Amino acid sequence: MAKKRISDKMEKLLNTQMTREAYQAQVYLSYASWAEVNSFTGIANFLYGHMHEEREHMFKFLKYINDRGGAAKIEAIDAAPKNPKDIGDCLQKTLQHEIDNSKEIDKIVNLAHEEKDWATFNFAQWFVQEQIEEETLINSIIDKYNLASTNVDGNTSLYEMDRDLSDASQEAETPRDEAF
């Protein structure tokens, strides 16, 4: 076994986060199954994809703990929360889980800084960036859900326009570009 290069306190915190990532995967799995049962296959596929991503995060923590000479501890995972009442509730709960997860990652960063554990500080930066991306992504999905679900004239058209623009070319063809 390698010489231990993380404190006992850090090892415990990293193990807690590893279990939290497994729990996050359970939440995404549960919500994906709920969406699928309710015929929201696109949302289900999105959530299943995130379930896999959370499991990868769990494994990153496991490998890091072991690689730094600690011992990853596989513990029981809490049951996922009850099913959401609708898609809006599902998205809001998903966002809150990501926000809560960000706060836990911040604890790792803060302890690493306090202990001058620059390897763990560097490792945690990947997760800081990941959480910024996750919160931004879920917020943008909530914005689109609100646009698509609010009973205001034209919202459906605006949603479709936004969707079309996401894949639109950044250049327009002009007559001079066409070969004669």
Image (cartoon, grey):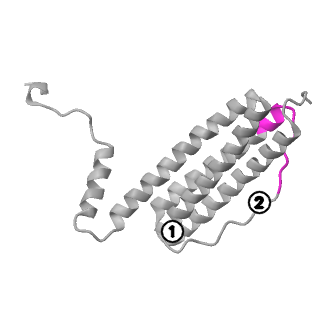
| Residue in the image at 71% along x and 44% along y | 107
Q: Earlier in the sequence, mark 2 or mark 1?
A: 2
How far across and down, in percent of the image, does residue 4 sit?
A: 89, 31
- The residue indicated by pointer 2 is 77
| Residue in the image at 60% along x and 59% along y | 28
Magenta region includes residue 70: yes
How far across and down, in percent of the image, does residue 168 sit?
A: 28, 41
Q: Main secondary structure of the magenta part?
A: loop
Magenta region includes residue 71: yes
| Residue in the image at 32% along x and 51% along y | 163
What segment carries the magenta color?
63-75
How far across and down, in percent of the image, does residue 176 sit?
A: 9, 25
- Residue 73 is tagged as none
Residue toward you, 19 or 119? 119
Answer with left or right where residue 40 lies relative to residue 174.
Answer: right
| Residue in the image at 53% along x and 75% along y | 85
Give the image quarter of residue 171.
top left
How far across and down, in percent of the image, does residue 10 sit?
A: 81, 40
- The residue indicated by pointer 1 is 89
Q: Residue furthest bottom?
A: 85
Mark 2 residue crowding within 10 angstroms, few (<14) / some (14–19) / many (20+): some
Mark 1 residue crowding within 10 angstroms, few (<14) / some (14–19) / many (20+): few
Answer with left or right where residue 156 lies relative to residue 84.
Answer: left
What kind of residue is marked 1?
Asp
Which quarter of the image is occupied by the C terminus? Answer: top left
Q: Secondary structure at mark 2?
A: loop
Q: Secondary structure at mark 1?
A: helix
